[in-house]
Amino acid sequence: MSRTRTVTYLFDPLCGWCYGASPAIATLSDVEDLVLELLPTGLFSGAGARPLDDGFAAHAWAYDQRIHALTGQVFSERYRTDVLGDRSQRVDSGPATLALTAVALTAPDREFAALAAIQSARYADGLDITAAATLTDILTGLGLDAAASLFAEGAAEGMGELTVADAARVERGRQLMAAYRASGVPTLLFDDGSHRRKLDSEILFSKPGRLAAILSAG
């Protein structure tokens, strides 16, 4: 009887490197007996949120070009002008993280698809994924109506079951980051059924199929 193995993916929705890692993470759905668990770490939410100023925008765009060169992921000119160039926006992943928690509670097997769609909306389409209306539209567009409703209610209330669940997920993500001495996201933890270890994040930025091949082999 085969053991169920788990990959825990520690991420932040506004992390460009996490967007770059998405093609590799997507291949894990083809690995037999492998469960993918997503946990946000709150890198850019709560106390980690900050203004989107000129310095941050320049820093982000420089890294974005490196990520594109490594992975081929699209960082569009619209993203550069409408997101990085908009000083009314904040670097705040709280709303997107809350939206993903709504998916985790209502359709957990669709959470990675929702994350990928949120990332694409920002980096390819240049949309403001810090806006609740944008996130609601993304979830609805994916057919995640229950998650969209739960998120819209939770975002409006500011406190409630969704907020509590979201805070618990972020706290667990942070605890795992500390326990495995992870210096940042994306971070992958692999549990083979007997013990858990941190994987080398560099495999996320080589050929997309390399990660799945390594995990398929053992």
Image (spheres, rainbow, N blue to C red):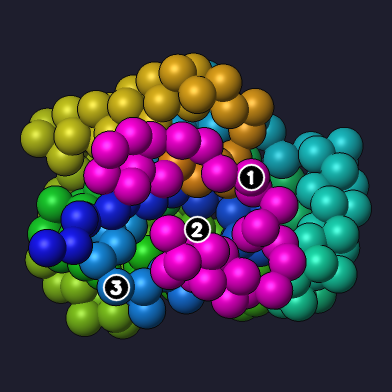
Check disc 3 and report its element: helix, strand or loop: loop
Please tell me whether residue 207 is drawn above or below residue 12 in the rendered image.
below
77 lies left or right of 47: right
For the point 56% across and 21% down, the residue is: 181
Q: Quadrant of residue 80?
A: bottom right
N-terminal of the pair, mark 1 or mark 3, is: 3
* In this rendering, position of residue 115 left or right of residue 53: left
Residue identified by numbered label 3: 32
In three-dimensional space, the C-alpha distance between marks 1 and 2, rounded to whole angstroms, equals: 29 Å
Residue 22 in the image: x percent, y percent? Answer: 55, 66
Q: Is residue 127 visible?
A: no
Of the image marks 3 and 2, the number of the one nearer the N terminus: 3
Q: Give the CA distance from mark 3 to mark 2.
A: 33 Å
Query: Residue 92 bears which disc, if any?
Result: none
Image height of 103 relative to 59, above or below: below
Q: Earlier in the sequence, mark 1 or mark 2?
A: 2
Q: Secondary structure at mark 2?
A: loop
The amino acid beneath tag 2 is Ile
Which amino acid type is shown beneath numbered disc 3?
Glu
Residue 95: x and y in percent read: 39, 45
Q: Are marks 1 and 3 in contact (CB under 8 Å)?
A: no
Depth check: give the residue in front, 135 or 179: 179
The stretch of residues the image draws in magenta is: 190-218
Amino acid type for the residue under numbered disc 1: Asp
Judged from the image, the secondary structure of the residue bearing numbered disc 1 is loop
The number of numbered badges drawn on the structure is 3
Residue annotated with mark 2: 129
| Rendered location of residue 187, percent (x, y) | 55, 42
